[in-house]
Image (tube, rainbow, N blue to C red):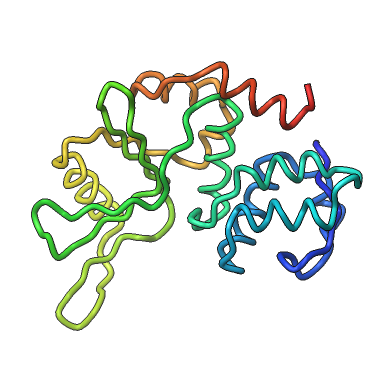
Amino acid sequence: MLRLLNFRCSFCSNPLDETQLRAPFSYGLAIADSALRVKDVSRGDLCERLRADCEGRRGYRRAQAIASYADGLSENGGESRFRAFFIAYGFPVPELQVEFRDPLDPSQVFRVDYFWRLEDGTCVIGELDGKGKYALRSGEGRESVDPFVAERQRESHLTMLGHKVLRFTFNELKDPGKLVEKMRLVGIPRQAKLAEEWRRQWYGR
């Protein structure tokens, strides 16, 4: 396991505990994303505070590497962990929480977890399963619907927009090789220079 910086600043109410000190990049990114989301501050603010308060301390370089990729639009730790995978394996970082109107019902808005605009003009939507986001608006507010049915309906409506839809499950993080192949098959390019940039920031070489 890799070490993170043990620091106290206005973005965190307490110093990182021993578990967090030994956390990998994906765990650190989840912490940083949550800090930006909860405190409603920017990535630049976090990087600057780290520089001002922690430069020269043990773990500073890796803390800055994490902060440089942090994004408060990530809504939970699962989304952060998948984004950490994209970063470390050299895939382009997607846009987060992009909104689309339902082509069959413009009053409905779909907000997707990830969105890639590829160089050839192809667009890919990424959706992380298991978040209980399936509900429909009724005249009196929101009503729950069967998750399986709603998932399929949501996906079919998204494909009507002309974009590919790529679904992720948490278990896929246990087999990075298969996940890399899944990304390749849908057309999302893996770029060696992006992976090398991350390795240089994280490992310092």
Relative to 39, say whether 190 is above or below.
above
Q: Is residue 7 above or below residue 189?
A: below
Numbered-mark total: 0
Q: Can you name the residue that lies furthest to the bottom here?
A: 140
Q: Position of residue 77 (x, y in %)?
A: 58, 52
Q: Nearer the viewer, residue 11 or 176?
A: 11
Write down the quadrant of residue 108 in the picture. Answer: bottom left
Residue drawn at (49%, 58%) of the image? 75
Q: Is residue 65 above or below residue 50?
A: above
Judge left or right: residue 18 versus residue 116. Answer: right
Q: What is the quadrant of the C terminus in the image?
A: top right
| Residue farthest toward the right in the current orientation of the protein | 57
Q: Nearer the viewer, residue 103 or 62?
A: 62
Residue at 82% from the left image edge and 51% from the top image edge: 19
Q: Position of residue 40 (x, y in %)?
A: 56, 67
Quick one: quadrant of the N terminus?
A: top right
Observer-nearest of 52 and 140: 52
Residue 202 is situated, as x and y percent measured from the top left of the image, at 74, 32
Where residue 183 sits in the image (x, y, percent)?
Answer: 42, 25
Q: Residue placed at 79% from the left, 27% from the top?
A: 204
At x 90%, y 45%, the residue is 56
Q: Is residue 124 left or right of residue 196?
A: left
